[in-house]
Amino acid sequence: MNRKALFGAISTVAALFIAQAALADENDVKKAVGPVLEQLFGPGVKADAVRKAGVLNLYEIQIGGELLYTDESVSYLVQGDILDVKARRNLTEERKNKLAQIKFSDLPLDLAIKQVKGNGKRVIATFEDPNCTYCKKLAKELQGISDVTIYTFVYPIFPNSGDLSKNIWCAADHAKAWNDYMLNGTAPAAAKCDASAIDKTMALGRHLNIRGTPAMFFADGSRVPGYMPAALLEKALDKGSANIRQ
């Protein structure tokens, strides 16, 4: 075996041992942190994943969409953001955004109200409560945007939104019923149909850890919680489409 091949083989073996050691460390920390989480936050609270954070020799503890940090011996728990002062970056926020990404094509789009504007090439999926003030503001902003397909998942998280959401879904033209209410305050007539899509959307929202409305997803799977004005929506739509093509 020549010198180059020998060093290549050694490097490969070393990398495997390092990966196994890191995995063992993470598993050990996950086992150790389990009872600590239940003691501090209550029975049933578990870490979905534990990974090396890459800074300060900390380990990242993922619980749903939230992050905590601990040391190797699980002697301390850190609750809060890690800021890179020199780079002016919020590392915790960046990590949360990464973890919140989805595969857009995995969304059950048949559960959503579909609207196509212009060529419809750009896409956005929103989770919205019809009584959400910022959802109504978002609806107005979306009126000024063209060449987009909008998938609206009706997500009634407000106590008085359930029947309204089902009436919108059961309307003969639920896209029109949605816009009539969101833009003009015109409530749909009472209607009955198979509205199980609303229940399925609620389950989907819980799975995606959506706690507030509006919540938006773009073509590249990026998530934006909250309202955005039209100018920022345009940029997010373009960026999402560009990233998908790469």
Image: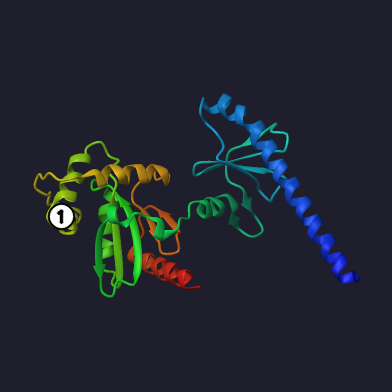
- The percent position of residue 24, horizontal first and vertical second, equals 72, 42
Q: Residue at x 76, y 54 (%)?
A: 16
Q: Nearer the viewer, residue 34 or 145?
A: 34
Residue drawn at 46 percent across, 69 percent down = 244
In terms of image quadrants, where is residue 203? top left
Q: Secondary structure at mark 1?
A: helix
**On the rendered structure, is 105 left or right of 77?**
left
- Looking at the image, residue 95 sits to the left or right of residue 141; the answer is right
Q: Locate the N terminus by quadrant.
A: bottom right
Q: Residue at x 19, y 58 (%)?
A: 175
Q: Residue 42 at what x, y percent from top left?
A: 51, 25
- Label 1: few (<14), some or many (≥20) within 10 Å? some
Q: Quadrant of residue 47?
A: top right
The answer to whether residue 108 is above or below residue 233 is above
- Residue at position x 61%, y 48% from top? 82
- Residue beneath disc 1: 177
Please identify the residue farthest to the front as the structure is shown.
1
* Circle count: 1
Compared to residue 189, the image places residue 5 above or below, namely: below
Q: How is the image coloured?
A: rainbow
Tell whether 63 sits left or right of 53.
left
Task: Residue 40 in the image: state x and y as whole percent.
Answer: 57, 26
Question: In the displayed image of the protein, which residue is found farthest to the bottom?
Answer: 119
Depth check: give the residue in front, 240 or 171: 171
- The disc labelled 1 sits on which kind of residue? Ala
| Residue 229, quarter of picture | bottom left
